[in-house]
Every structure is written in C-alpha cells, then in structure tokens.
C-alpha cells in the first residue's frame, strides 16, 4: 500500500526495510563528508558479507557501509564491529549499501582474529541476522533428510524496499 507524497499528487513507494545486525569486518576506510573544522559527517567504508555458494565455496560479497558520526569515533579498517542498520539496494544490478546507526556499534576484535586457517570456513559466515517486512517474491518447499523421517521446510524470498532506494 502506498501513501501520497508531500505534494499529494503521486503515491510514494511503500517501505519494506531490511534491518541487519551482526559482525562487519571493515576492509577499507572510504571518503567522508567533513569540511574544514567540522566534527560530524557521513563516513563511508568497504566491507563484505561472507556467504557459501553451493559448488563454489566461500564468497565475499562487497558491501558499501555508511554511517553518520563524529571524526573522533569513526570506524577503523582492519577491525570487526557489531553494527545495526538498514541494507538498501542502490543499483539495479544489485549493489547494496548498509547504513548503520552509530550509537549501536561495538568494537569486537581486530580482523586478524577472524581470518580462517586453510581448510576451515571463515568465522563470519552466517553471523548476520536480517529481519523486517517485505513482499513475498517466491516460496519453495524443500525436503531435507532428518533423524527418523525427512524434514519439510518452507524457503521464502522477500523483496525489501526502502524510502532511500535509488532503484
């Protein structure tokens, strides 16, 4: 359901945000919006979400991370932080931005603590929690082997939108 925009003539896009909480490894510190003598602004970072692709193994999906805050408490590269915020798709090809809430971040450990040894999976796989409302895109029933009998699960794919989406 959509509501009229501020002009009242066109309906605006409904918002179904995707909230995310979990550990983020800050790979690189990007640009910021600070001008001379400013203390607060928008800070940009580069991180990744570690996933397992069946038949291919681990994959690091690059995500742009952004947060508003003070230059005195900006995130540092080479550090894993617990972050909470919204994941927003910003291009039609699937580029995502993660906008975190600065007041909810927590330093966990240096990134070197999470580097996996050869043959072992990355410790950050499956650690992000996603919640929110969305529009059902598809639903598939999957049967997997269980203890005494097969287990039936329902896999649902949701489409999340946000007021700030560019697509």
Image (cartoon, rainbow, N blue to C red):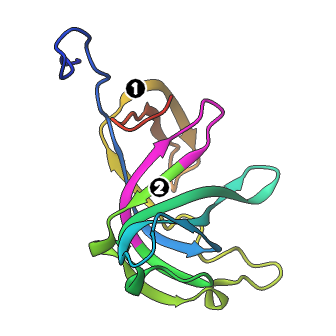
State which mark lies toward you, 2 or 1: 2
Foreground residue among 20 and 71: 71
First along the sequence among labels 2 and 1: 2
Considering only vertical position in the picture, is 115 above or below 34? below
Kindly identify the residue that appears in the image at 41 percent across and 64 percent down: 67
Which percent across, then down, holds residue 52?
A: 69, 57
Considering only vertical position in the picture, is 7 above or below 20? above
The Cα–Cα distance between marks 2 and 1, rounded to whole angstroms, is: 22 Å
Foreground residue among 134 and 25: 25
Element at badge 1? Answer: strand
Residue identifier under label 1: 136
Kindly identify the residue that appears in the image at 54 percent across and 35 percent down: 142
Are the residues tagged 2 and 1 within 8 Å (C-beta)?
A: no
Residue identifier under label 2: 98
Name the residue furthest top.
9
Total marks placed? 2
Query: In which quadrant of the rendered image does the N terminus lie?
Result: top left
Kindly identify the residue that appears in the image at 62 percent across and 91 percent down: 113
């Amino acid at each position: 359901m959509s509501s009229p925009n501020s002009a009242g003539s066109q309906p605006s896009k409904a918002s179904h945000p995707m909230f995310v909480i979990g550990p983020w490894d800050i790979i690189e510190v990007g640009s910021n919006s600070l001008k001379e003598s400013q203390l607060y602004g928008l800070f940009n970072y580069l991180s990744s979400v570690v996933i397992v692709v069946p038949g291919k193994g681990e994959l690091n999906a690059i995500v742009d991370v952004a947060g508003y805050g003070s230059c005195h408490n900006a995130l540092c590269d080479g550090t894993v932080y617990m972050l909470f915020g919204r994941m927003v798709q910003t291009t039609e090809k699937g580029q995502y931005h993660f906008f975190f809430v600065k007041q909810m971040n927590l330093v966990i450990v240096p990134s070197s603590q999470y580097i996996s040894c050869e043959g072992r999976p990355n410790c950050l796989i499956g650690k992000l929690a996603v919640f929110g409302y969305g529009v059902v895109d598809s639903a598939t029933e999957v049967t997997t082997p269980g203890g005494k009998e097969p287990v039936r699960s329902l896999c649902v794919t949701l489409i999340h939108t946000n007021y700030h989406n560019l697509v």
